Image (spheres, helix red, strand yellow):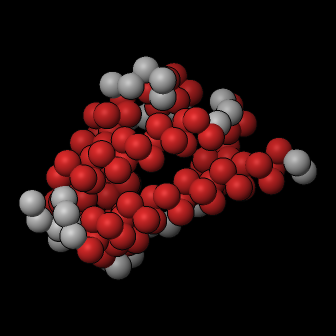
Amino acid sequence: MKDIENQHDLYLLVDEFYKKLLSDVSISYIFTEVVKIKIEEHLPVLVTFWSQAILGTGGYVKNMTQIHLDINKKEPLTPELFKIWINHFYSAVDENFVGEKAEKIKTQALSLATIMQIKIAQEKHQ
């Protein structure tokens, strides 16, 4: 296996990741019923986000934290959902890539999940 090298690799990764999420009934409802994502529109946004984070390409301009805080107002994003999310993300990475960037993307995903949970908890106590 090779490391994550370009946006094509990231597209493969997020596509595999979302196949896992959408086939898992314990979390898929967030994407199909709460947010109702259009996967063909959502994947390129995620590729841009991860490309900026891992490859330094830039281009992601949305406020990811606010997006998730808004989702949490519709349906609580629980610690259990974050565990499911991170487990599927790690699996998608480990099944397709190995190397420095593969490890970096997993570390950043865990950091993002942790920060999101902190922000959600803070908002709950305001």
Farthest bottom residue in view: 56
Q: With 16 as the anchor, is 106 left or right in this view?
A: right
* Relative image position of residue 91 (x, y in whole percent): 30, 45
Total labels drawn: 0
Asked whether 44 or 121 is in front, the reply is: 121
Q: Point out the residue furthest to the left here.
A: 1
Q: Residue at x 58, y 35 (%)?
A: 80
The image position of residue 39, as x and y in percent, is 34, 37
Asked if residue 68 shows in the view, the reply is: yes
Residue 33 is left or right of residue 44, and the answer is: right
| Residue 114, percent from left and from top | 60, 56
Q: Residue at x 45, y 65 (%)?
A: 108
Does residue 27 appear to the left or right of 67 in the view shown? left
Above-or-below relation of 78 to 2: above
In this rendering, the answer to whether 62 lies above or below 70 is below
Q: Is residue 77 visible?
A: no
Quadrant assignment, res 3: bottom left
Q: 74 left or right of 1?
A: right
Q: Nearer the viewer, residue 59 or 20?
A: 20
Q: Residue at x 28, y 34 (%)?
A: 19
The quarter of the picture where the N terminus appears is: bottom left
Q: Quadrant of residue 60?
A: bottom left
Residue at coordinates 55% horizontally, 53% vertically from top-left? 113
Q: Position of residue 47 (x, y in %)?
A: 32, 58
